[in-house]
Amino acid sequence: MMSALKRFLIGRPLKSEELAEEKLSKFKALAVLSSDALSSVAYGTEQILLVLMTVGFVALWYSIPISIAVLGLLTILILSYRQTIYAYPTGGGAYIVSKENLGVPVGLLAGGSLLVDYILTVAVSISAGTDAITSAFPGLHDHRVLIAIVMIAFLTIMNLRGTTESASILAYPVYLFVTLIVLLILSGLYKYAAGGVSAAPQTHDMAISGISLFILLKAFSSGCSALTGVEAVSNAIPNFKAPAEKNAARTLMMMGLILGSLFMGISFLAYTYGITPRPEETVVSQIAASTFGRGPMYYAIQASTALILFLAANTAYAAFPLLAYMMAKDKFMPRMFTARGDRLGFSNGIIVLGVLSAILIVIAQGHTEGLIPLYALGVFIPFTLSQTGMMRRWWKMKPKGWAISFLINTIGMITTFSICLIFLITKFSQVWIIFLFLPVVIYFFIRIHKHYLNMANELRIDPKAETPVTKGNVIVVPVAGVNRVVLNTIGYAKSISENIIAVYVAFDDDDAQKMEKKWEEWNSGIRLVILKSSYRSILRPLIKFIDTIEWKTSETDYVTVMIPQFITRSWWHNFLHNQSSILIRAYLLNRKDVTISTVPFHLKH
């Protein structure tokens, strides 16, 4: 039943040879990997205006130069990550660049920041999409956490079905959003050029009373939230069809062009329409209402905006498993992240991302707005480290034309580092936790790595000097009586060794005498040892006996505990029986130099 449900939700297993068919074309990759960045069009301008409105309406003029500054930073980042793609075509982005050029600890800082940021991406994006739904249908507000979890489950299942299939389905809402926003911007510009804008903006002198460098920097850093997700393409190069690096670079350039155009278009229309942020209505909603009225086009834009906010989380689903795979390959994360699932995706990474983001939403009760600055800072730390790493790479290698590349990365590093400082200064109360959380994450990476290294050293052998040691085998069979399960187990034990000891734990003298008599009547040829348990515990006397056997025979024999276990036909039958065999096996797993074997006997009824 569970297998049938899994096949229904995820689909048939794919052969390893079909991996090439799961690679993404530029068209699909643009939709999957740019949904996070493109979704910021829905709130990037609004974040700038929210800060400027603390001074007053007259300060809204500054939204245009600030938007241009954000566009300039986007250009620098796109050019920088384009260089990263060609320099590191195997993917990994900031993690690989930082690790190879700045050292392992810095690489772990970049990787940890990105992993945490992808979890925040899912939580924040899904919550934003849920807010859009509950704004349209206020009666659903009390169910916002459930709606968010359902959407996370949907995206998780879609990504478990495979990269190509999820991209084929999820591409439509992304391109629908881009098309509708382009129509909105063109219609708005036409209306403005035709003199149809009713709320013409006022012009102001550059010096406005009450505005300060602090406010401008805070507005700029808030607008930089529109740049989250730009790094996803450089992390996910292995997901592209060959030639992967060329297709990734072109996809990155297309994403930058679309994002920059849409962001500037919305910022310009917000200014020309004289729009101010409202708690009950978004900036995009106000622009759409002013341009088209509250008709079908308006509701289509609102619906597509809600969809893109939901699907922004899909960028994390594409990038998180790949980054986790690369860090696991370097032994800094559990090896389970290197395993491909039935549909050839890194399914463990997909599931872990979905579970952690769902937990975050439940803890925050769907109110993740306060996580946006932390989410943005989590992106700009890897941005800065990646730029610095590329600077060092160019300086060390000095290939032909390296000076221009070095200059681009230097400008990018200075800018992104400045934004990190701005975030820390202007929003310290919201981002201070990162100073506690990231060191803990890095500490776990180091502990995991140390464990794998220690394990490898302990398991390593010298093939020339070490050969298997041949010993005898003492088999201990815990028995609960004389029955077919015990008969089956002892028969199997005899095929391995003649040195077999059956052990029975009796709770009183009568019980011991009855068992002794039955065993003599059976005449199995196997010695029976009866242990007394005054406290009605099976484990204590049994473990003590096994320890004694191991102590006496370890030099000449292996000790194997062979546990008889019957397997019921229906799962619910297990609740009708004592599970002593499971308890014994679980306890003995921690005993050194003792081998545990289970001999199943399948019941027919």
Image (spheres, rainbow, N blue to C red):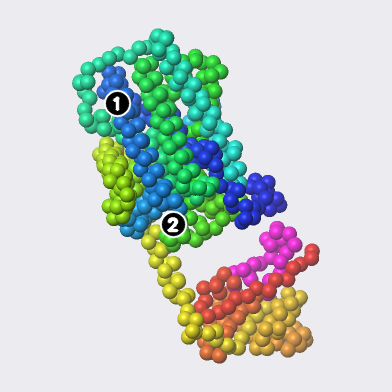
Q: Which mark is residue 592?
A: none
Residue holding disc 2 = 327
Q: Is residue 43 above or below residue 106?
A: above
Q: Is residue 316 above or below residue 282?
A: below
Q: Quadrant of the C terminus?
A: bottom right
Question: Is residue 7 at least partly visible in the picture?
Answer: yes
Residue holding disc 1 = 65
Residue at image position (32%, 52%) is 399
Q: What's under tag 1, amino acid-wise?
A: Pro
Range of magenta residues: 564-584
1 vs 2, front mark: 1
Q: Secondary structure at mark 2?
A: helix
* 71 is within the stretch colored magenta: no
Residue at image position (27%, 18%) is 58
Q: What's under tag 2, amino acid-wise?
A: Met
Residue at image position (62%, 52%) is 18
Horizontal relation, residue 278 to residue 219: left or right: right
Furthest-right residue in this view: 605
Dot 2 surroundings within 10 Å: few (below 14), some, or many (20 or more)?
A: many
